[in-house]
Image (cartoon, helix red, strand yellow):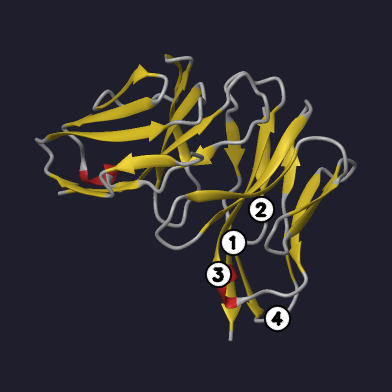
Amino acid sequence: DTEVTQTPKHLVMGMTNKKSLKCEQHMGHRAMYWYKQKAKKPPELMFVYSYEKLSINESVPSRFSPECPNSSLLNLHLHALQPEDSALYLCASSQGLNRAGEQFFGPGTRLTVL
Amino acid sequence: AQSVTQLDSQVPVFEEAPVELRCNYSSSVSVYLFWYVQYPNQGLQLLLKYLSGSTLVKSINGFEAEFNKSQTSFHLRKPSVHISDTAEYFCAVSDRRNRDDKIIFGKGTRLHILP
């Protein structure tokens, strides 16, 4: 199994809602990532988990809360989002420990905040 | 710190014509280099990568890229493009010492194939 899965594919939420994005991989990777991608822009790194511990938080607002319950799962909890948070949210994984640097990406969740 | 420059935001090219997408990077340390492709409404896929060894790397669908250390470049080429190559192409760099495999993306080049 060489893929990263993400659910849901699409999500529409209001500014007062609480929702979660889910990411899963079964490649034995020990590093997992959340990215935000706006239209016609490169992905922007949000969080990195290495060996299930948060290792990088790129100054992301607290309305985004990541969670790594185990080495295969990564969640992103959303609360009180703003319309400008509407974007494609991408999850990725890699072997970690810089064994090759390559990241494997999921198909993304397209989020719309009303 | 590393940075990646993709000078062309958009490249139009006729079908079956050759194409080159330019990528230059800046780094004070040794790096890994990547090209990722993003088809419309999809996530990113690795197209090819340079880790070490031969400076010319090739993908299964006809793309190739050459690592040029002196010019700090990693340009992507294809001798004959197809309509299915329409996509956004991102050049990326990773610090070899980085335990987290953090990668830095360029701004992307949109390849537009003309019939």
The x, y position of residue B16, in whole percent, is 70, 81
The x, y position of residue B29, in whole percent, is 78, 25
Q: Give the residue displayed 62% in from the left and 18% down from the top.
A: A97
N-term mark: 1 or 4: 1
**Residue beneath disc 1:** B9
Q: Give the residue displayed 82% in from the left and 43% down from the top.
A: B72
Which image quadrant is residue B13 in?
Answer: bottom right
Q: Which mark is residue B16?
A: 4
Distance from label 2 to label 4 (Cα)? 23 Å
Q: Rate crowding at label 1 as few (under 14), some (14 to 19) or many (20 or more) other CA atoms within 10 Å.
A: some
Task: Confirm whether circles 3 and 4 share one chain.
Answer: yes
Task: Confirm whether circles 1 and 2 share one chain.
Answer: yes
N-term mark: 3 or 2: 2
Which quadrant, please, contains the N terminus of chain B?
A: top right
Q: Is residue B74 visible?
A: yes
Callout 4: SS? loop
Task: Confirm whether circles 3 and 2 share one chain.
Answer: yes
Disc 1 and disc 3 in contact, CB within 8 angstroms: no
**Residue beneath disc 3:** B86
Distance from label 3 to label 4 (Cα)? 12 Å
